[in-house]
Amino acid sequence: MKRIFYASGSVITGDTLAEAIVRYAEVLSQRDSSDTIDIPISLDSGDVGRAQLLIGPASQLVIVPEEGTFVEVEDDLTIAELARRAALLASPHPQHQQGPDALISDYANDFSDGTDAAT
């Protein structure tokens, strides 16, 4: 298990899930973006709960091993979703290339007042 420390406290979750959170936070930071994630956590009562974390460039997460009798929390769907989000942000996105005519038309439309000067 891992304890995740963040700005206002800490939560305990599974090892694999904590690693997925760190990977996603790193990609978000590289893209200067942020996201809110919903993760399962181990509560002091021994039950499993949920926590929402805002992660991004300003996040300072510290993750350390946690000893104790807490429930090992792993959620394959959450891990897969974090990996999917990280992969989407990490991969380059192709940009549509416009030809010179389209660029000139776009430029002209930016300055058009909706009237035709030729009439």
Image (cartoon, rainbow, N blue to C red):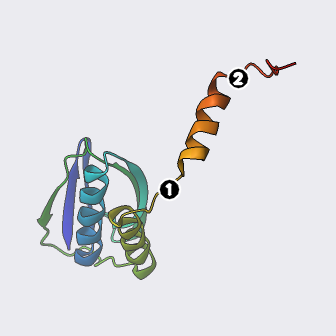
Q: CA distance from mark 2 to mark 1?
A: 23 Å
Specify the quadrant of the image occupied by residue 101.
top right
Question: Is disc 2 placed on a helix, strand or loop?
Answer: loop
Residue drawn 63% across and 27% down?
Answer: 110
In which quadrant of the rendered view does residue 112 lie? Answer: top right
Q: Residues within 10 Å of mark 1 (few under 14, many from 20)?
A: few
Q: Which residue is mark 1?
A: 97
Farthest residue, direction front: 118
Give whichever of 57, 95 is nearer the camera.
95
> Where does the image place residue 66, in percent across and percent down from the top left?
14, 69
Amino acid under disc 1? Gln
Q: Secondary structure at mark 1?
A: loop
Left or right: 64 in relation to 23? left
Vertical placement of residue 11 versus 101, above or below: below
Q: Which residue matches tag 2?
A: 112
Q: Farthest residue in the bottom direction?
A: 76
Pick whichever, 96 or 18, lies toward us. Answer: 96
Residue 71 percent location from the top left of the image = 29, 77
Q: Which mark is residue 50?
A: none
Q: Is 27 placed left or right of 107 in the picture?
A: left
